[in-house]
Image (cartoon, rainbow, N blue to C red):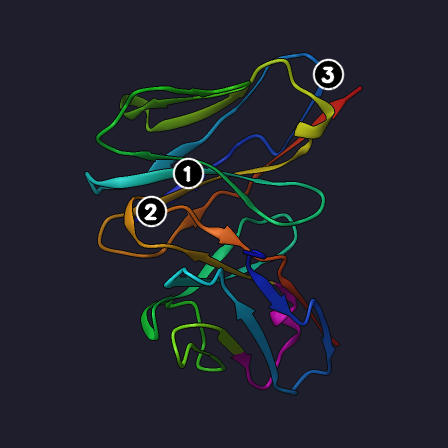
Amino acid sequence: AQKVTQAQTEISVVEKEDVTLDCVYETRDTTYYLFWYKQPPSGELVFLIRRNSFDEQNEISGRYSWNFQKSTSSFNFTITASQVVDSAVYFCALRTSGTYKYIFGTGTRLKVLA
Amino acid sequence: DTGVSQNPRHKITKRGQNVTFRCDPISEHNRLYWYRQTLGQGPEFLTYFQNEAQLEKSRLLSDRFSAERPKGSFSTLEIQRTEQGDSAMYLCASSSQGVRYNEQFFGPGTRLTVL
């Protein structure tokens, strides 16, 4: 069975702090895809990143970085120098090959305080 | 390109009534997904279309739910004999072919309240 766990329900940080959102996934498939989505207060989910199971390179995009570790089945997301606009619910998701079904975690609500 | 649109944005209905939602994907996107999201949860996959073909449907979806995409463009999701447990946000997403096929663009959702 496939599963995505985001153990952090809510995180509060002060602006300019760094914050890491955790994501742990479960799958027996060797080919799979991992995603992060942002859901701001306005409600629409926004795609942030996709990672393939065969590519463990970490990625940095501006203040965002992602750490993919197959050994621990984790795909963590770090925001450096957080800003108030980063306040949102962040979802991690998994899709395995051979299915079009995306499995989302329960999300982590990030509050960045000015 | 105006993004994914969904109508209506809100729907209030009485238990036992039928409801239908519409999704208009981004025009060049041939892949379309429906999800349901309840408070405090992540989106839950309902079904997937590639062009007009419904290729995958969640086993969680009861027979009261049906979705169509007749011409491979817009899609409708119908819920028959609604129950209070159907109250949720119904999300539609679309994606293109090619290397970015996994990148889903979500619509604003239709919030359903069943009284």
How many angstroms separate mark 3 from mark 2 (CA)? 33 Å
Residue B70, image quadrant: bottom left
> Where does the image place residue B20, in percent across and percent down from the top left?
59, 80
Chain for disc number 2: A
Q: How many marks?
A: 3
The amino acid type found where label 1 is placed reads: Phe
> Where does the image place residue A111, in percent across and percent down from the top left?
71, 28
- Mark 3 vs mark 2, foreground winner is 3
Label for residue A35? 1
* Vertical order, A104 against B96 (above or below): above
Chain for disc number 1: A
Chain for disc number 3: A
Mark 2 is surrounded, within 10 Å at the Cα level, by few (under 14), some (14 to 19) or many (20 or more) other residues, namely many
Residue drawn at x 39%, y 51% is: A102
Label for residue A15? 3
Which is nearer the N-term, disc 2 or disc 1?
1
Which is nearer the N-term, disc 3 or disc 2?
3
How many angstroms separate mark 3 from mark 1 (CA)? 25 Å
In magenta segment, residue A109: no
Which residue does the numbered mark 2 point to in the structure image?
A: A95
Residue contact at pointers 2 and 1, CB within 8 angstroms: yes
Q: Nearer the viewer, residue A81 or A26?
A: A81
* A61 lies left or right of A71: right
Q: Secondary structure at mark 2?
A: strand
The amino acid type found where label 2 is placed reads: Arg
Residue A29, image quadrant: top left
Residues drawn in magenta: B78-89
Q: Nearer the viewer, residue B115 or A38?
A: A38
How many angstroms separate mark 2 from mark 1 (CA)? 8 Å
Residue drawn at x 34%, y 50% is: B101
Q: Secondary structure at mark 3?
A: loop
